[in-house]
Structures are given as C-alpha cells and as structure tokens.
C-alpha cells in the first residue's frame, strides 16, 4: 500500500473487520482479518489468574486512562525482537490522531517511578479493539487489561477483540469465533451506542 495510513482509513478497516500492521522488514502497511478471531470475554468467562489476583489486591499501580497515550503506543512499539515490530511511525501517527479524535484509548499503570505498563486500542460503538500492551514491571500490562475489562463491562461493551489468540491471553479466557460470526458481532456492536 503506497498511501499514508490515515485515521479515516483505519476506522473504515475496523468497521469491516480488518486492522493494520506494518511489515517489520519493508515498512509496508497491510490489513489483516484473522479467521478465527480472538475475543476476551466480558462476562463471567473472563478469568483472572490466581497469582494476578494476589497482585491486584496489593494495588501496586495507580490506574489511569488516556493520560499518556503517545507514550503507551511508543512503548508498545519498542521490542527486543525486530521481527515483531509491527508498530512503525505511520501506525503511531495514525493512532495518535485517532486518540485526538476520541477513538483510541490507553489504560496505564503508574507508580512513583513513572509509567510501568499499559495497553491501547480503539473503541467504536460497543466494540473495543485491543492493539498492543507492554510492561516495565511485573504484571503491569495484565493489571491494565483487567482494568480495561472492568471499564468495558461498566460501559456495556459487547466484546474486546484481541485479533489472535496467544498463550498469554488464553489465561484470561480468550476464545475464538469464526470470521462470519465475528462480522455479525461487529455489525451489532457498531450499531449500538
């Protein structure tokens, strides 16, 4: 794709069940539509691992939302594994604009030493599309995820899209739906406000 990645293009892609990623070698932006699609449940199927429950009880972080969006995206982009660097400058810029427009959000874990972890994604209708997460201290990204799920439940979101299943996300009850079913869920979520 030769065109710049615009916020409008990203929103249009989400509405069609797709999302952008940059190729770590070429920098080319491609759009993906996994089949099956991974979702984190927002009902009682959401599972908090036992060790994480203990960490949550200690309240090691102050939770904030949307106070350091660019920093969260930038931290998510940094990885020790170059083959996993799918967040490039175009992605950072487009999502920064989506944040300014009120569509992209971050959940952040802070302590006295600063930002220790978080995640970001896009909210459209009653769908939340999780994009990436990072941590500098143990459990920070997981605690941000739990906080996001609590927020989405309180605001009656229909689903949290994680795109693909990972061993890490399976611990929280992640499940998969076929693309056809996902598109039906997406249509319903986009129609609700």
Image: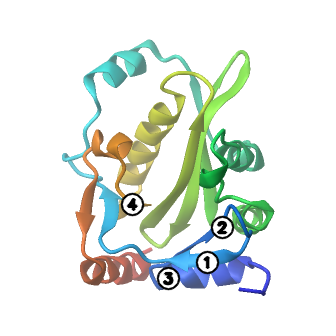
**Alpha-carbon span between mark 4 and mark 3:** 17 Å
Whether tag 4 and tag 2 are in contact, CB under 8 A, the answer is no
Q: Quadrant of residue 192?
A: bottom left
**What numbered label is drawn on residue 30?**
1
Which badge, 1 or 2, comes first in the chain's sequence?
A: 2
Badge nearest the viewer, 4 or 3: 4
**Kind of element beneath mark 1:** strand
Q: Where does label 3 land, which residue?
A: 15
Whether tag 1 and tag 2 are in contact, CB under 8 A, the answer is yes
Q: Where does label 2 land, which residue?
A: 23
Q: Is residue 47 visible?
A: yes
Count of marks overlaid on the render: 4
**Alpha-carbon span between mark 4 and mark 2:** 17 Å
Asked if residue 156 lies left or right of residue 46, the reply is: right
Asked if residue 138 lies left or right of residue 100, the reply is: left
Q: Is residue 55 above or below residue 136?
A: above
Q: Quadrant of the N terminus?
A: bottom right
**Kind of element beneath mark 4:** loop
Asked if residue 43 lies left or right of residue 71, the reply is: left
Q: Quadrant of the C terminus?
A: bottom left
Residue at far left of view: 44
Q: Residue 2 at what x, y percent from top left?
A: 77, 86
Q: Where does label 4 land, which residue?
A: 164
**Alpha-carbon span between mark 1 and mark 4:** 16 Å
């Amino acid at each position: 794709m030769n065109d710049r990645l615009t916020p409008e293009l990203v929103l249009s892609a989400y509405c069609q069940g797709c999302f952008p990623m940059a190729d770590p070698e070429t920098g080319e932006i491609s759009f993906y539509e996994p089949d099956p699609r991974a979702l984190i449940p927002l009902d009682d199927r959401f599972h908090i691992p036992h060790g994480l429950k203990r960490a949550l009880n200690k309240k090691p972080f102050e939770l904030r939302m949307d106070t350091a969006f660019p920093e969260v995206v930038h931290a998510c982009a940094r990885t020790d594994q170059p083959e996993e660097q799918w967040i490039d400058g175009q992605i950072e810029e487009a999502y920064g604009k989506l944040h300014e427009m009120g569509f992209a959000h971050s959940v952040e874990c802070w302590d006295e030493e600063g930002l220790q972890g978080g995640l970001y994604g896009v909210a459209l209708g009653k769908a939340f599309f999780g994009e990436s997460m990072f941590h500098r201290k143990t459990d920070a990204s997981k605690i941000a995820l739990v906080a996001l799920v609590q927020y989405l439940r309180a605001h009656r979101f229909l689903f949290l899209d994680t795109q693909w299943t990972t061993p890490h996300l399976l611990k929280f009850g992640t499940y998969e739906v076929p693309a056809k079913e996902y598109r039906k869920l997406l249509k319903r979520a986009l129609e609700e406000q």
